[in-house]
Image: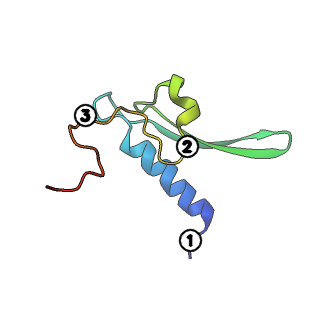
Amino acid sequence: MRSCWAILMQNLLGNAWKYTGRNMGPARIEFGAINRRGLAHFFVKDNGVGFDMSCAADLFRAFRRLTTPPSSKAPASASPP
């Protein structure tokens, strides 16, 4: 069974790769650690598309969209005729 750290790193690095540098020049992805008060703080930085900082509070809410879904005449739960 994979460890939580392995899953976390796969997700962080996978997202960095997915959203980095396709049309913005060479991709730049950095993984590192800094020491704060004797504790290691790890980070992943990239030159990807980023996100609107006004939505930062919503980033980690479950099932919250950061974009407006396309409009539709029928509600998502509508039954077929």
Sequence-first disc among 2 and 3? 2
Task: Quickly name the residue at label 3.
Answer: 71
Q: Quadrant of the C terminus?
A: bottom left
Q: Amino acid at mark 3?
A: Ser
Between 69 and 25, the one nearer to me in the picture: 69
Quote the CA–CA distance across marks 2 and 3: 22 Å
Amino acid type of the residue that numbered disc 1 sits on in the rendered structure: Arg
Q: CA distance from mark 1 to mark 2?
A: 25 Å
Give the image's coloring scheme: rainbow
- Near mark 3 (Cα within 10 A), the count class, few <14, some 14-19 or many ≥20, is few
- Is residue 13 toward the left or the right of residue 25 in the image? right
**Front tag of 2 and 3:** 3
Q: Along the horizontal axis of the image, is 11 left or right of 70?
A: right
Judging by the rendered image, the residue that carries numbered circle 1 is 2
Q: Position of residue 69 (x, y in %)?
A: 31, 36
Hey, what amino acid is under mark 2? Arg
From this viewpoint, which residue is outermost toward the right?
37
Q: Which disc is residue 61 wearing? A: 2
Q: Residue furthest front?
A: 81
Query: Is there CB contact under 8 Å for labels 2 and 3?
Result: no
Q: Quarter of the image holding residue 1?
A: bottom right
Residue at disc 2, secondary structure = loop
Foreground disc of the pair 1, 3? 3
Residue 8: where, in percent of width, then height? 56, 56
| Residue beneath the point at 28% across and 30% down | 23
Tell me: residue 18, above or below residue 52. Answer: below
**1 and 2 marks in contact (CB < 8 Å):** no
The crowd level at tag 2 (other Cα within 10 Å; few <14, some 14-19, many 20+) is few
Kindly report the distance in space between the C-alpha atoms of the residues bearing marks 1 and 3: 40 Å
